[in-house]
Each structure stands twice: as C-alpha cells, then as structure tokens.
C-alpha cells in the first residue's frame, strides 16, 4: 500500500508525495517548485525515487532542475508530447510506470484538453490527474479542444467510483460556487459545500476526493443529466444535443462569467 502526502506550494498547488508505508522512498508528482519538496524529504530522511509530471505548465515542472541537482539521476516520467526536456522516460497511453523502491506502479492515461499532451497516473485506486479533473471542476482548455477535454474527463469518470482523485490545486470551494450556479438544488453539492467549508476553515486539504462524489457533484462530469442540460440550454439560449455541447457551454460560462 502506498501513502500519499500533500506538499502545499505557491498559493493553491499540491505537489503529491507518494511513498511506501514506512516513508523511506518517495515519488513526487508535479514539483512546480523544489524547496518545499527538499524540505519535506529532508525532514523525513526520505530518498527521492521518481518524479512524475502530468503536463508542462510552470507550476508543475519548474522545480525539476533543482530537484535533479539535489538528487542526481532521479528518473523523470512525463508525456511524450509535452516537450519536457528533463524527462528520462517519455510516456504514451497505457504505458506503465514501475517504481520498485515503493513497490508500486501506475498506468498512464493520455488526457488531452487542458494542454495538448496531458497525462494522468492511475494506480492502487488513486488518480493523479494534474489540472485535467479538479475536485468539483475541471481545467481550462488551453491547448486542446473542448471535445478533447470532455472525452478525457469521460474516460476518467469511468474509473471505479471509489478511486481517489488527487488533482494539483485546492480549488474545491471556488468550483462548488460555480457548480451551484448549474445545479442550485443538488443536495449532495450543498452538503459538499458545507463539509468543504469546514475542512478549509480548519486548514485541511479538500483533496483527494472520491470519484463517486465527483460523479454526484461535479457539473463537468454530469453533462448528460436533464437538469444540467437544462441549465446549459438556458445559458446558451438554444437547445443542445450532445454531452460535448453541454460541456462547452458550461466551460465557457465558467470562464467568462464566474472566474
Ligand atoms: Zn496547468
Ligand atoms: Fe496548475
């Protein structure tokens, strides 16, 4: 069994530290900055076994060089199409990343949309998905297309419902605000808002969350439900015929009016 710890970074990033149970070896996901990672490892006398990268944005990669200086020859795993120069292994869909020191492995899922070549790592019931699927939201479409991100999210949504979603930012409360614009009467969502307030007020991360809760509350995974379609149609002032059209309206609505 792996253990996962958050290393908070910048204003709202989580760098995830994956380890064996006795916390001797660590794999680090998306080190946008090195200092908090080095501090975290040194506090625990931990050894850096691997660096995993979901996509090329600075808040996910800018700590790689300093980490490699500090821990030379650490393997770096990233997407084949993200042009991350420090990658020692470039990954494609269905590749498996084996981390023997932690006695675990992760399956690679190609999830384009936020960027052109985003990947997610899935293993031991845990999903490390960077900025693709967020708790109660999803990433913005920067390089891919709306349809690509929609289909990436649909693929993630078919993982087992007990899967824990480890995204890279603490956005839950803000995302719930928009989700309530879409579904003001969703009782699961109102309950999630109250619970998330409690967590944030006591300085606790609201990530990870079970995929089941995302399916119940995340509007971007609910584009085929009648009340979500209705809300999107009201906003678009036209009828919408597919999940991807609904998704596009929701994403644009959030980008232009909520954020
Ligand atoms: Zn990003
Ligand atoms: Fe990010």
Image (cartoon, rainbow, N blue to C red):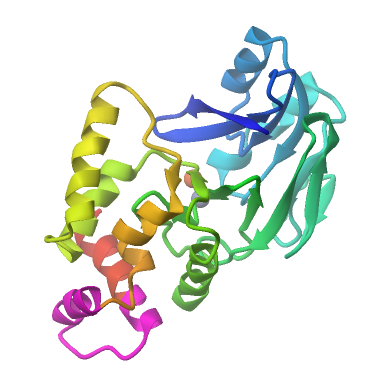
Please tell me which residue lies in front, 238 or 211. Answer: 211
Image x and y of residue 103, in percent: 80, 35
Above or below — where is 242 with respect to 4?
A: below
- Residue at 68% over, 33% down: 1
Q: Which residues are magenta?
A: 226-248
Is residue 237 covered in magenta? yes
The part of the image, by quadrant, that contains residue 3 is top right
Residue 18 in view = yes
Is residue 259 covered in magenta? no
Residue 86 in view = no
- Residue at 18% over, 79% down: 230
Above or below — where is 221 with respect to 210?
A: below
Horizontal side of residue 240 vs 61, given as left or right: left
Please tell me which residue lies in front, 196 or 139. Answer: 196
Image x and y of residue 257, in percent: 19, 61
Image x and y of residue 110, in percent: 65, 64
The part of the image, by quadrant, that contains residue 200 is top left
Extreme right residue here? 73
Main SS of the magenta segment?
Answer: helix
Horizontal side of residue 208 vs 236, given as left or right: right
Above or below — where is 33 with respect to 113?
A: above
- Residue at 38% over, 38% down: 170
Horizontal side of residue 163 vs 242, given as left or right: right
Image x and y of residue 222, in percent: 33, 69
Q: How many tags in the picture?
A: 0
- Residue at 70% over, 33% down: 64
Horizontal side of residue 85 vs 117, given as left or right: right
Please tell me which residue lies in front, 117 or 107. Answer: 107
């Amino acid at each position: 069994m792996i253990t996962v710890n958050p290393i908070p970074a910048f204003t709202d990033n989580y760098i995830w530290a994956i380890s064996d149970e006795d916390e001797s070896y660590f794999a680090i996901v998306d080190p946008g900055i090195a200092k908090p990672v080095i501090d975290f490892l040194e506090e625990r006398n931990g050894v850096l076994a691997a660096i995993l990268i979901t996509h090329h944005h600075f808040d996910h990669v800018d700590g790689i060089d300093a980490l490699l200086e500090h821990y030379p020859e650490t393997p770096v795993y990233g997407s084949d199409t993200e042009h991350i120069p420090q990658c020692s292994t470039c990954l494609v869909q269905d590749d498996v990343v084996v981390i023997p020191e932690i006695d675990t492995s992760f399956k690679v899922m190609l999830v384009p949309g936020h960027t052109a070549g985003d990947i997610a790592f899935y293993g031991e019931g845990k999903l490390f998905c960077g900025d693709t699927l967020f708790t109660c939201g999803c990433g913005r479409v920067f390089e891919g297309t709306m349809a690509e991100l929609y289909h990436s999210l649909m693929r993630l949504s078919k993982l087992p419902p007990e899967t824990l979603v480890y995204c890279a930012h603490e956005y839950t409360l803000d995302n719930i605000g928009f989700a309530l614009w879409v579904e003001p009467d969703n009782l699961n969502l109102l309950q999630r808002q109250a619970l998330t307030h409690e967590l944030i007020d006591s300085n606790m991360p609201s990530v990870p969350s079970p995929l089941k809760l995302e399916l119940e509350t995340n509007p971007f995974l609910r584009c085929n439900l009648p009340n979500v379609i209705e809300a999107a149609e009201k906003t678009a002032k036209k009828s919408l015929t597919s999940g991807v059209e609904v998704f596009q309206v929701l994403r644009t609505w959030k980008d232009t009016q909520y954020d």
